[in-house]
Amino acid sequence: MKITKPCVALVASPGMGHLIPNHRAWETPDISGLVDSATSIYTQLAIMMRLALPNLQAAISAMESHPVALIVDLFGTELLVLGGEFKMLKYIFITSNAWYLALNTYVPTLDKNELDKHVEKPGTTVDPGLPAGFIR
């Protein structure tokens, strides 16, 4: 039985490469025909990552030994399906501070009434990780 060193796949969205150095095993898809000047950069990144899925899938399939884990950034969450397909551990790497991560994790738990309160009177929402009674 051949023993190989385990490796991980780190997939950074376009623009994150200067923060997360990585080897490019696949090309970023051209989305110029799918977006216009009004399309937000966030939407553009999400589209690019979605279209990269088949190329990344092919790159991983071609590997002699598949990675044991898949690590994506915030815009690469749609690529996590590959983790299931190739039986890899799946992680999301957030290149931000802990408060931002806590807020993004907490926001889906807020009910509509809490969100309406914040719209009517900004600064009244409760932020995770802040001292009790602290109003942003």
Image (tube, helix red, strand yellow):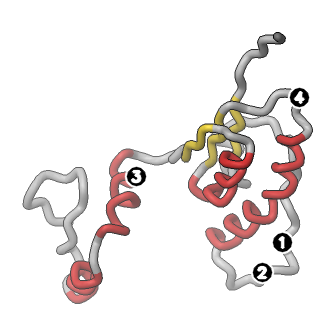
- Quarter of the picture holding the C terminus: bottom left
Q: Tell me, for residue 103, which label it has, or none.
A: none
Q: Tell me, for residue 35, which label it has, or none.
A: 2
Identify residue for label 4: 64
Q: Are marks 2 and 1 in contact (CB under 8 Å)?
A: yes
Identify residue for label 1: 31
Identify residue for label 3: 101
- Category of crowding for the residue at label 4, using alpha-carbon neighbours closer than 10 angstroms: few (below 14), some (14–19), many (at least 20): few
Check the image and report above or below for 129 versus 65. Answer: below
User: Which of the two discs, 3 and 2, labels the residue nearer the N terminus?
Assistant: 2
- Category of crowding for the residue at label 3, using alpha-carbon neighbours closer than 10 angstroms: few (below 14), some (14–19), many (at least 20): few
Check the image and report above or below for 29 versus 26. Answer: below
Q: Position of residue 33 (x, y in %)?
A: 87, 80
Callout 2 secondary element:
loop
**Side (left or right) of 109 relative to 120:** right
How far apart, in angstroms, are the residues tagged by discs 2 and 4? Answer: 37 Å
Callout 1 secondary element:
loop
Amino acid at the residue labelled 1 = Ile
- Category of crowding for the residue at label 2, using alpha-carbon neighbours closer than 10 angstroms: few (below 14), some (14–19), many (at least 20): few
**Side (left or right) of 110 relative to 65:** left
Residue shown at 24% from the left, 61% from the top: 127
How far apart, in angstroms, are the residues tagged by discs 3 and 2? Answer: 28 Å
Callout 4 secondary element:
loop
How far apart, in angstroms, are the residues tagged by discs 4 and 3? Answer: 35 Å
Amino acid at the residue labelled 2 = Val
Which of the two discs, 4 and 1, sits closer to the camera?
4
Which of the two discs, 2 and 4, sits closer to the camera?
4
Of residues 76 and 129, the one nearer the viewer is: 76
